[in-house]
């Protein structure tokens, strides 16, 4: 009950204009072509001369989250993207405004080479070890997932001072090229090793309700919209995250077809309208969670089969989180 009360209170502060990071929609140039002018100007093109780029940061609560940031188009856009994750005074101050932390140690020199096979090699020179294995793993996850947002990169190999290595100073295994990591995996009874288990990506607000956090939960019930919405309503396992559904809310039905998701919940959800921002926060988490299953352009929320009237205007989010300008 306490978690539910905290959920309703904190959702007042939730930033709504954010949404699911879209995977791989702009390209890093092939090996030997590091000219930003060779990149496609497409759906991720922002204002003239800037690109909408999804970066992965650590949070003050210890999660890894995607955050869209407008960055200038320039030669070697992949390396430029990583530069925002480096621990500089400017980056640290900018990230702190959102409860984020940089992940690449200060003074590290970066070089990036992209092969025709989709494997990127990131070399770290002058690398200062992290204070903990957790911080080191956070860097690896953030770096790999950030680079994998570029369509020409499928995997990332990390080297140090031009040499292949098996582990980083705190023991993180980097022997092989790495593909994007599942984020913020819950420690439930079902794990990736469980026969028949599938991963769901659920979105919950963090404790301060300032960020939407992707959580990986393994289930034996299949990666369906019904399973995902039921898990979302049940709430997170981690007490640092919040649910957005009033006590007693149950899922009646959910379907997802041709980019349109429809979620029908019980009448208990109606009480969400009495806590400012709570129903809009629930909409955002439902949209992001559905979009993690397949691309969504419309979400319809029903209560006992009737369209729900939100207490404020809502918009379909484009990214899970957006950097403060």
Image (cartoon, grey):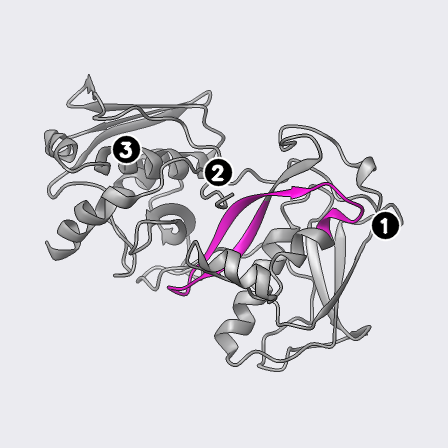
Q: Where is residue 56 in the image (x, y as percent from the top left)?
A: 54, 54
Relative to 154, 75 lies left or right: right
Q: Is residue 231 visible?
A: no
Query: First in sequence: mark 1 or mark 2?
Result: 1
**Image position of 125 with respect to 182: above or below:** below
Residue occupied by mark 1: 31
Disc 3 and disc 1: Cα gap in Å?
44 Å
- Give the structural element (helix, strand or loop) at label 3: helix
For residue 303, what is the image quadrant? top left
Q: Residue at x 17, y 53 (%)?
A: 6
Q: Residue at x 45, y 39 (%)?
A: 292
Disc 2 and disc 3: Cα gap in Å?
15 Å
Q: Where is residue 227 in the image (x, y as percent from the top left)?
A: 31, 40
- Give the structural element (helix, strand or loop) at label 1: loop
Query: First in sequence: mark 2 or mark 3?
Result: 3
- Mark 3 is surrounded, within 10 Å at the Cα level, by few (under 14), some (14 to 19) or many (20 or more) other residues, namely many
Which labelled disc corresponds to residue 280?
3
Q: Which residue is drawn at 75% across and 56% down?
A: 120
Query: First in sequence: mark 3 or mark 1?
Result: 1
Dominant secondary structure of the residues highlighted in magenta in the image: strand
Residue occupied by mark 2: 319
Q: Can residue 320 be seen in this view?
A: yes
Front label number (3 vs 1): 3
Q: Where is residue 152 in the image (x, y as percent from the top left)?
A: 74, 44
Specify start and end residues of the magenta stretch as a single range. Answer: 54-78
For residue 171, what is the image quadrant? bottom right
């Amino acid at each position: 009950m306490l978690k539910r009360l905290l959920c309703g209170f904190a959702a007042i502060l939730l930033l709504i204009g954010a949404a699911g990071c879209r995977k791989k929609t702009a390209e890093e140039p092939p090996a030997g072509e590091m000219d930003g002018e060779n990149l496609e100007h497409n759906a991720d093109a922002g204002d003239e001369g800037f690109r909408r780029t999804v970066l992965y940061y650590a949070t003050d609560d210890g999660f890894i989250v995607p955050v869209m940031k407008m960055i200038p188009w320039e030669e070697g856009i992949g390396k430029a993207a990583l530069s925002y994750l480096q621990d500089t005074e400017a980056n640290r101050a900018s990230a702190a405004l959102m409860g984020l932390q940089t992940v690449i140690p200060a003074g590290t020199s970066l070089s990036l080479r992209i092969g025709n096979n989709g494997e990127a090699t990131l070399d770290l020179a002058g690398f200062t070890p992290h204070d903990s294995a957790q911080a080191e793993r956070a860097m690896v996850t953030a770096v790999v997932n950030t680079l994998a947002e570029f369509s020409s990169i499928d995997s990332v190999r990390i080297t140090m001072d031009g040499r292949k290595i098996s582990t980083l100073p705190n023991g993180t295994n980097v022997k092989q090229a790495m593909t994007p990591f599942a984020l913020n995996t819950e420690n439930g009874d079902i794990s990736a090793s469980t026969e028949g288990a599938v991963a769901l990506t659920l979105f919950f607000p963090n404790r301060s309700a300032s960020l939407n956090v992707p959580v990986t939960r393994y289930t034996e019930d299949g990666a369906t919209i019904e399973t995902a919405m039921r898990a979302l309503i049940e709430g997170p396992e981690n007490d640092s995250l919040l649910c957005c559904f009033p006590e007693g809310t149950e899922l009646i039905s959910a379907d997802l077809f041709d980019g349109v998701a429809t979620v029908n919940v019980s009448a208990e959800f109606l009480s969400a309208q009495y806590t400012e921002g709570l129903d809009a926060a629930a909409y955002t988490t439902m949209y992001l969670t559905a979009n993690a299953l397949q691309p969504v352009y419309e979400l319809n929320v029903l209560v006992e089969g009737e369209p729900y009237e939100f207490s404020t205007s809502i918009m379909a989010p484009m990214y899970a989180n957006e950097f403060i300008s």
